[in-house]
Amino acid sequence: MLSPAVMTDALTLWDFHQIDDEPRATDVGIGLGSHDIGVAEHTAELFHQGRFPLIVFTGANAPTTIGVFPRGEAVHFTERAEELGVPRGALLIEPKATNTSENFTFTREMLERDGIPVASATIVSRPYQQRRAYATVRKVWPELDVVCSARRQELGDYIASIGDESRVLNMLVGDTQRLWVYADAGFAIPVDVPEEVRAAYDRLVAEGYTSRLVRQ
């Protein structure tokens, strides 16, 4: 059970990562692979709403997903979307990406190779990955017109859906750190992180939520 102080700091990070883009139609939906099958489900929902005619699921495996999605994140996400009624002909699989930069780079290369023109995309991710996804796509695919989207959930509900509060908080802290680490490394554009967010991050690190931190 999380203490009130830890939950307050986690909520500060959670709220910061949300991007409330106005929904609109785009050429394609790009679902970023992860441990969270909810990304596939939300992408399917947006497809059925008419937000895009084509979906690309992108992702191989990470240490946190190999046991859950042994045939690759994009493969399992595609299968889930099909179960939810998305036609197979509206689905493309990018199976090689192992990080967010590769998600966009390999997706772009695949679409260009297949002769599919794309000027705009809806980026679908975990709720707390939105700012990093946006910063990354702006760096590696700057001309793409993007809308960010994630399933709207309260943090407590998201923790319940994943079933592991420690994992969620470690991932949340790790994604926050990656905003400045990856910008410094040239993988993403800089993101302005407010002082209260950085302070909440520091307190959560001090509490031991460090398993997903990038070594610097």
Image (spheres, helix red, strand yellow):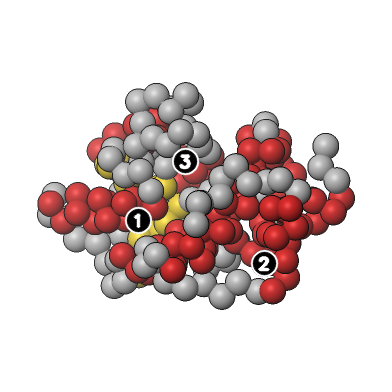
- The image position of residue 32, as x and y in percent, is 41, 47
Which residue is disc 3 drawn over?
A: 34
Which quarter of the rendering shows the N terminus?
top right
Distance from Cα at disc 3 to Cα at disc 2? 24 Å
Toward the viewer: 149 or 186?
186
Distance from Cα at disc 1 to Cα at disc 3? 14 Å
Q: Which residue is drawn at 70% across and 38% down?
A: 165
The earlier-in-sequence mark between 3 and 2 is 3
**Pointer 1 with pointer 3, Cβ within 8 A:** no
Residue 2 visible somewhere in the drawing: yes
Q: Residue at x 27, y 56 (%)?
A: 105
The amino acid type, in three-letter code, at marker 2 is Arg
Which residue is disc 1 drawn over?
A: 101
Q: Point out the residue furthest to the right here.
A: 4
**Mark 2 secondary-structure assignment:** helix
**Mark 3 secondary-structure assignment:** loop
The earlier-in-sequence mark between 1 and 3 is 3
The amino acid type, in three-letter code, at marker 1 is Ser
Tell me, for residue 198, which label it has, or none. Answer: 2
Q: Which residue is drawn at 46% across and 33% down?
A: 63
Toward the viewer: 84 or 203?
203
How busy is the neighbourhood of tag 2: few (under 14 within 10 Å), some, or many (20 plus)?
some
Q: Which residue is drawn at 67% across and 31% down?
A: 163
Q: In this view, does 166 lie above or below 109?
A: above
How busy is the neighbourhood of tag 1: few (under 14 within 10 Å), some, or many (20 plus)?
many
The amino acid type, in three-letter code, at marker 3 is Ser
Q: Is residue 63 above or below residue 116?
A: above
Tell me, for residue 26, which label it has, or none. Answer: none
Residue 25 visible somewhere in the drawing: no
- The image position of residue 23, as x and y in percent, is 49, 64
Q: How many marks?
A: 3
